[in-house]
Image (cartoon, helix red, strand yellow):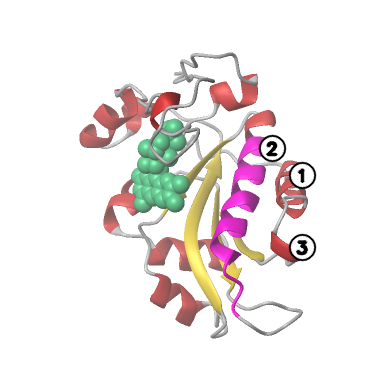
């Protein structure tokens, strides 16, 4: 099943084909692919090159996977159990250089996850990010230090058969992907004033 974007202007095919499925086939991801996906995150830009991203990676069957799974809200547990890889994306809240708060750490972790998502898409894999997890529990289970924050859980895998999902989830899998029009978020002159570009 494909849920490709319907762009108004042509975009790269890996961006067009990417979406966030809930059905994975459980098949293992080759270690080399996983290494390339994480390498992509490494090359994301970040404020002052702080690289505030950290990932805890679990593979189905190992203890890390099980612990990440336990932090997921029930809704996400319903489907994420078929993903062969579960990760936690963690950000360092303070600057390595100054020790002050890094105001961009969440922004930068998001960019790193975007990078790994696009690499995964290039590898024919799918990524589904989750805000629905217990960050406090994750902090405890993984001894995450005080100036770091667990920001999202991430499922990665090969797409599976949506008909094997819980019936409520099957419907979600079939709904059309919708987006705002570009004119609603691209402005000129002042905020809210539509750009002539669009
Ligand atoms: C930070 C973040 C948190 C998300 N949390 C969840 C979640 O807890 N459960 C879930 O099923 N999907 C979650 N999603 C997936 C979004 O719902 C999905 O990306 C969005 O609907 C757009 O769909 P698409 O990725 O298929 O284009 C999350 C996505 C992001 C980026």
Q: In terms of image quadrants, where is residue 23?
A: top left
Q: Earlier in the sequence, mark 2 or mark 3?
A: 3
In the image, is 74 to the left or to the right of 182? left
> In the figure, 93 relative to 26: above or below?
below
Q: Position of residue 138 (x, y in %)?
A: 46, 73
> In the figure, 113 relative to 58: above or below?
above
- Ligand 1 shows up in the quarter that is top left
Picture residue at 46% right of the left edge, 15% below the top: 6
Mark 1 lies on residue: 36
Q: Are marks 1 and 2 in contact (CB under 8 Å)?
A: yes
Q: Earlier in the sequence, mark 3 or mark 1?
A: 1
In the image, is 1 to the left or to the right of 45? left
Picture residue at 72% right of the left edge, 83% below the top: 98
Q: Position of residue 44 (x, y in %)?
A: 72, 50
Which circle marks residue 49 in the picture? Answer: 3
Residue 118 colored magenta?
yes
Q: Magenta residues?
A: 101-120
Q: In terms of image quadrants, where is residue 185?
A: top left
Q: Mark 1 or 2, which is nearer the eye? A: 2
Q: Which image quadrant: the N terminus?
A: top left
Callout count: 3
In the image, is 44 to the left or to the right of 193? right
Cα gap from disc 3 to disc 1, whole angstroms: 20 Å
> In the figure, 82 relative to 102: above or below?
above
Q: Position of residue 64 (x, y in %)?
A: 56, 66
Q: Position of residue 36 (x, y in %)?
A: 77, 44
Q: Mark 2 or 3, which is nearer the eye? A: 3
**Does residue 38 show up?**
yes
> In the figure, 48 relative to 77: above or below?
below
Residue 181 colored magenta?
no
Mark 2 lies on residue: 119
């Amino acid at each position: 099943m494909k849920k490709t974007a319907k762009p108004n202007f042509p975009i790269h095919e890996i961006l067009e084909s990417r979406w966030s499925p809930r059905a994975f086939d459980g098949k293992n991801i080759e270690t080399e692919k996983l290494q390339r996906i994480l390498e992509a995150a490494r090359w994301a830009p970040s404020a002052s090159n702080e690289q505030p991203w950290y990932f805890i990676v679990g593979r189905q069957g190992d203890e890390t996977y099980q612990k990440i799974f336990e932090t997921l809200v029930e809704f996400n547990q319903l489907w994420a159990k078929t993903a062969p890889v579960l990760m936690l994306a963690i950000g360092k809240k303070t600057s390595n250089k100054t020790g002050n708060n890094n105001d961009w750490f969440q922004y930068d972790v998001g960019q790193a996850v975007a990078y790994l998502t696009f690499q995964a898409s290039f590898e024919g894999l799918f990524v589904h990010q989750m805000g629905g997890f217990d960050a406090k529990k994750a902090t405890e289970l993984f001894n995450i230090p005080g100036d770091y924050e667990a920001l999202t859980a991430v499922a990665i895998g090969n797409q599976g058969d949506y008909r094997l999902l819980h019936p409520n989830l099957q419907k979600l899998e079939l709904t059309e992907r919708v987006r705002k029009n570009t004119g609603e978020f691209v402005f000129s002159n002042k905020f809210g004033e539509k750009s002539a570009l669009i």
